[in-house]
């Protein structure tokens, strides 16, 4: 591969830094974990020298820097928010856009912002290690009834609850993909029996048993805890409804890394308030941040975390860059991009 005459023009559009942010720009859109610095990019080049030699990169934060970069960019990398704010993403040379998240449902339909014929790529797979730790912590909290005790504290109630060890209990993983699989592996490390539910029904190495969606009820009736790690798609929205909660054991605990549109809120509220679910930990909401007046805040036995379960403060961007370089390598070779998004499925 030649070391001069770059064959791919790459533009990285970051959230604006405080000094470049427009007046009133929300700080939450400028999370430094999602910014890709020049130093991080240079480190990635040293990890992938074969690809780096064939790439010419530019960086931007402002609208003007975006427009300058898109004059000849063939690839753009940005957060979901940046892609939406800079829309349309239709530079004359653009071949694909990479979003720095695994979920891209907010970008659909892509016809509203992406150049016709250009591909969409995501960073699915980088979240697994951190998510696995979060899921393990959540399962242990639920087994020790921490959400219940947090609610009791707010009500100044002294209500002892004595539980058994988590070892030997059963976890159902609804959506055994990268994140669900990481949770399954951690649960096995805790001595749990893990049942997986995935669209294909194919075995998953971290699950003791794996079934398709048609066997969901049998799995839920056996589970002491349920992990919902489904993507948010037209097919899954509202799919965790009253019927699904009725299938769960009385007293089961729920962990969710899936976005809240996957749930029927009224059904979840009823399950928590009635005690049919002993507790829940939810991490991914729409909209975010959750408004102060939202009913999510007042549900009993519920722990809310602000969409941080899968984010490694130091490794998020380096891991994303490694996936970027894998996709650039495939592009240079004329191969299929490894993390090309399936627009029809929504993940």
Image (cartoon, rainbow, N blue to C red):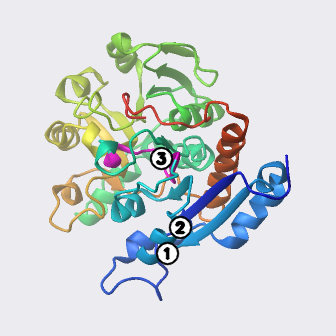
In 3D space, how far apart are the residues under numbered discs 1 and 2 (Cα atoms)?
A: 6 Å
In 3D space, how far apart are the residues under numbered discs 3 and 2 (Cα atoms)?
A: 43 Å
Tell me where residue 166 appears, x and y as whole percent: 53, 35
Left or right of 76? Residue 304 is: left
* Residue drawn 71% across the image and 51% down it: 7
Quarter of the image for the C terminus: give it. Answer: top left
Front-lying residue, 15 or 258: 15
Residue 27 is covered by the magenta coloring:
no
Q: Earlier in the sequence, mark 3 or mark 2?
A: 2
Q: Which residues are magenta?
A: 95-107
Left or right of 238? Residue 230 is: right
Tell me where residue 324 appears, x and y as whole percent: 64, 49
Q: Can residue 150 be spotted in the picture?
A: yes
Q: What is the secondary structure assignment of the residue under circle 1?
A: helix
Q: Can you say whether 147 is above or below 24 in the image?
A: above
Q: Which residue is mark 3?
A: 138
Tell me where residue 56 appears, x and y as whole percent: 69, 61
Q: Nearer the viewer, mark 3 or mark 2?
A: 2
In 3D space, how far apart are the residues under numbered discs 1 and 3 (Cα atoms)?
A: 42 Å
The quarter holding residue 239 reads top left
Q: Are marks 1 and 2 in contact (CB under 8 Å)?
A: yes
* Residue drawn 75% across the image and 59% down it: 44
Q: What is the secondary structure assignment of the residue under circle 2?
A: helix
Residue 69: assigned label: 2
* Residue drawn 37% across the image and 45% down it: 161
Q: What is the secondary structure assignment of the residue under circle 3?
A: helix
Left or right of 245? Residue 283 is: right
* Residue drawn 50% across the image and 20% down it: 195
Q: Which residue is mark 1?
A: 65
Q: Nearer the viewer, mark 1 or mark 3?
A: 1
Q: Can you say whether 65 is above or below 273 in the image?
A: below
Tell me where residue 198 appears, x and y as whole percent: 45, 20
């Amino acid at each position: 591969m030649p070391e001069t005459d770059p064959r791919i023009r790459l533009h990285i559009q970051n959230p604006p830094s405080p000094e470049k942010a427009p007046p009133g720009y929300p700080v939450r859109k400028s999370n430094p974990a999602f910014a890709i610095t020049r130093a991080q990019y240079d480190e990635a080049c040293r990890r992938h020298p074969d690809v780096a030699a064939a790439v010419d990169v530019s960086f931007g934060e402002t609208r003007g820097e975006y427009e300058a970069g898109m004059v000849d960019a063939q690839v753009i990398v940005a957060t979901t928010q940046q892609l939406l704010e800079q829309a349309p993403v239709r530079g004359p040379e653009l071949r694909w856009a990479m979003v720095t998240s695994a979920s891209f449902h907010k970008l659909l339909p892509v016809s509203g912002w992406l150049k016709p014929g250009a591909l969409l790529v995501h960073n699915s797979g980088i979240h697994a290690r951190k998510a696995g730790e979060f899921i393990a912590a959540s399962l242990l909290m639920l087994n020790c009834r921490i959400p219940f005790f947090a609610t009791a504290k707010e009500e100044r109630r002294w209500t002892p609850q004595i539980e058994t060890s988590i070892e030997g209990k059963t976890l159902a993983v609804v959506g055994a993909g990268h994140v669900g699989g990481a949770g399954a592996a951690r649960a096995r490390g805790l001595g749990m029996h893990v049942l997986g539910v995935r669209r294909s029904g194919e075995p998953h190495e971290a699950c003791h048993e794996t079934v398709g969606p048609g066997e969901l009820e049998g799995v839920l009736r056996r589970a002491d805890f349920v992990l919902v790690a489904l993507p948010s798609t037209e097919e899954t929205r509202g799919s965790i409804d009253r019927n699904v909660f009725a299938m769960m054991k009385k007293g089961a605990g729920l962990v969710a890394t899936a976005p809240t549109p996957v749930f029927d809120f009224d059904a979840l509220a009823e399950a928590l308030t009635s005690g049919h679910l002993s507790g829940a930990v939810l991490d991914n909401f729409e909209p975010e941040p959750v408004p102060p007046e939202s009913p999510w805040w007042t549900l009993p036995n519920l722990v809310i975390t602000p969409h941080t379960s899968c984010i490694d403060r130091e490794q998020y961007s380096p891991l994303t860059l490694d996936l970027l370089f894998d996709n650039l390598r495939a592009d240079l070779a004329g191969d299929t991009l490894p993390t090309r998004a399936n627009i029809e499925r929504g993940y």
